[in-house]
Amino acid sequence: MNEPLLSVDDLGIAVDHRELVHRVSLHLARGESLALVGESGSGKSLTARALVSLLPSGLRATGTLHVDGAEVDPTARAAGHRGRQVALLLQDPFTMLNPTMTAGDHIAETLSAAGRPRADVPAEVTRRLAEVGITDPSVAGRYPFELSGGMSQRVALAAALANDPGVLVADEPTTALDATTQHDVLALLRRIQADRGMGLVLITHDLRVAFSVCDRVMVMYAGSIVEHAPAAALRDQPLHPYTVGLLTSVPSTEHYQQRLVGIEGSVPATHTVLDRCAFADRCAHRIDACVAAAPSLVEVSPGRFSACLRTGELAAAVQVRDAAGVRAPAAPGEAVLQVRDLRKVYRSGGATHTALDGVSFQLRRGEALGVVGESGSGKTTIARCLLGLTAATEGEIEFAGVGVVGGRRSTAQRRAVARVVQCVFQDPYSTLNPMHTVGATLAEALAHRGRPVADRNAEVAALLQRVGLAPDLAGRRPVALSGGQRQRVAIARALAVEPQVLLCDEPVAALDVSVQAQVLELLREVNQQQGTSLLFITHDLGVVRQVTERVLVLHRGVVVEEGATDAVLDRPAHEYTQRLVASMPRVGGDWLT
Amino acid sequence: MTAAVQPAAAADPARRVRWGWLFWAAVGVVALAVFAALTVRWIAPYEPSAQNLVDSGQGPSGQHWLGTDQLGRDIFSRLLAGARTGLIGPLVVAIGAGFIGTALGLWTGYAGGAVDSVVMRTIDLMYAVPPLLVAIVVVGLFGGGYWLAVGVLIVLSAPGDVRIVRAAVMAQRELPYVAAVRTVGVGPLRIAVRHVLPNVTPTVVANVLLQFVVGLIALSGLAFLGLGVEAGSPDWGLMVAENRGILDLNPWAVIGPAVCISLLAIAVTVIGDRVYEVLSQRTAAR
């Protein structure tokens, strides 16, 4: 093996006295691709930033970093290797580009800085854009706001590559993109990496993305590397219980799972678990030795490392994929919600934008209906119209027991609708009032249900237990809760009103994979055991497969396909649905081609 | 996915925001002023308005720590007494304007629409008028009076408060937690008062403190011009004006009240800044 291009030894990152990343070592050879996989709080992004000497100020780094044989300082403000040898591609394509510079300027700036003759630059910009799949040369003259997310990410990629770096560090480059766009950008990234023989460090939370793009995968947990293996080996036989849990947590797009298994609890802060196995608290295979000392990363077989004391004995016991489950036959009752020919047109200045163009559907009692679409499909607009947060331009919505209610609602109408439809919103961090305790939030919702409240504290405790939380959380504020806990509180608040329909607008999109499964399981239980209808809005076909029995596919404000979930996902009829299904990340097989 | 964000971060005592020494020094200055205002009757070495023409215009000495003015009144005692008008007037201005500003800001910011337009256009109109000039004209026209000056300043300061609170409320209004409680069926008044108001409290508190400073400077300025406080009463602004003539005999008769005004203004500004930072960090930590 030749001299590694990028070499990190014993990297530690700390703020004050709290360590955030602990003893991370990685080596990348020329032309190799490595994925760093982890959930939020794993330290993967900080590690990536250390590679390009772009750590946020106030953070200290220890350890050594060698780029092409030369040692560099991970905390240096002006790092010579940045851009030339190691380039960085970030997550959000909309904030990564300077809004006052055209797409071409971004690339030209780097080209000129590299000392390319001024006359060559325009032609070179066109060539570079072509490399990232932008063949229309007029794109070079456009500003970031005139570009779509996928287009912006391609321009950012071209700008990052303008200096022909030896290594590209890509930090969640496709997380903010739609599934179909993510598919195209990842395929592009993989092709460019192979064509250029460039090193690639891909940071992602999605193991499926890591498997399909990279040669090797490192799994990080609470600031440390817990497993490191070739992608194929890790996919077929993960060794560390955390990796197994992560793989199991991903809801299958291919078949219905009888039980969604997540990982109980949430990621601890790195500095609290340095003297023990960080995963021990959430691990089903824990023994006393696990909390006695921190296990080190040991080579189990050539090229395979795992930081688990019980690697040898557990290898046979772990099983990732469960078999396809059988759906309980649903017996939906009468309609609780009827939407007829809903249209919503946004006007700003002289321009009009049609968000919904004649959407009709019916939701029956006890039914779980999915609404699938990408950003801009109008799926959230449906939710806002139903909740009365915006008024539809045309069409009507009929609620069971209330009748047709328009967009402009009186407080009395709002209360009547509230007892039919309750909502769980996407962002667990802003869905709860930060100034109110969990108990106050739930008590307020209880006051708005149909039945009188006899014993407030007892009812709040019962609600918390129903969503799988300890009753003593009632006294806490949202700040003290994890994302998953907050989303459970949000579900409890919705259930407190005892609605007939629970409207879920991407309820797990902002949660870590290991926590998603628990929340989805809870929603399934609310639907199946308590007969509350679900209207489930999401972009994730795996989630749709697991939670809903019927699905609407929404594309540019129009329902393009509708039917039983299994039928639509297995045999998509519409061209758009086919494209959507094909671009969904999968664990097995090569979905990137 | 920022790796640095840990759940339950605020529960970690090591990360709890601290007030800092500067804040406590500022609190000390204000506490001293409050103490002087409350106890001047007992702790002042001389009756603040007692004249002693024999000792007029003296520099600092063992008897008179900061000397005397033209009428032989003890400067130090008058400074202690001046804390009263230095605190009460600005406080009433700040609280009065803060109350009007918060109420109107909350209403217009949350309700929007026609109410918002009418109130905001009125405020734009008021912005076009130079406040101190209006105060001088009005107070001069009605023959002075401390409380009239305070009243005029409340009316003239409120528009700024309305704007600031309204902007903060409008930012909160768009957050999902507001949509969530609307969906639960909570009425608009309750949402505005129970949900939005606590979340704009850092802004409101900081703004009231800043308004105190503006009030102090404005009232001192009016007093300097001979408007507002009654002639002869111990007021820092008025003292600067009255003692200009004996600057060569006893400079402390001018420097003393000027320093008092500046120190109190700076201290309250520091407190306001810090309160805003700490409150908003404590509430917004996620």
Image: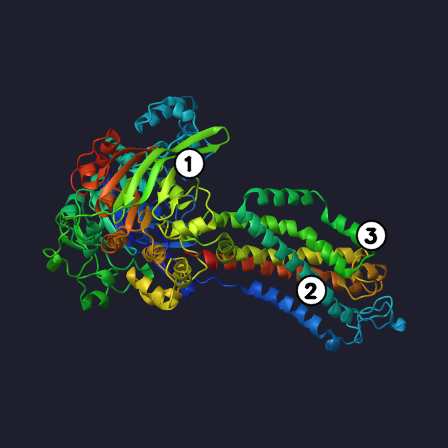
The answer to whether residue B235 shows anywhere in this view is yes
Q: CA distance from mark 2 to mark 1?
A: 51 Å
A323 up-or-down from A463: above or below: above
Q: Amino acid at mark 2?
A: Leu
Reading the image, the residue beneath label 2 is B87
Residue toward you, A522 or B11: A522
For image coordinates 78% across by 65% down, the residue present is B252
Q: Chain of mark 3?
A: B
Location of residue A119 in the rendering, given as x and y in whole percent from the top left corner: 42, 21
Which circle marks residue A524 in the picture? Answer: none
Reading the image, the residue beneath label 1 is A97
Location of residue A198 in the rendering, given as x and y in whole percent from the top left corner: 26, 36
Q: Amino acid at mark 3?
A: Leu
Q: Does label 3 lie on the same chain as label 1?
A: no
Q: Nearer the viewer, mark 2 or mark 1?
A: 2
Location of residue A58 in the rendering, given as x and y in whole percent from the top left corner: 43, 54
The crowding category of the residue bearing disc 3, from other C-alpha atoms within 10 Å (few below 14, some 14 to 19, many at least 20), is few
Residue toward you, B272 or A115: B272
Q: Nearer the viewer, mark 1 or mark 3?
A: 3
Reading the image, the residue beneath label 3 is B141
Q: Amino acid at mark 1?
A: Leu
Q: Does label 1 lie on the same chain as label 2?
A: no
Q: Quadrant of the C terminus of chain A?
A: top left
- Asked which quadrant contains residue A568, the reply is top left
> Which residue lies most toward the left here?
A316
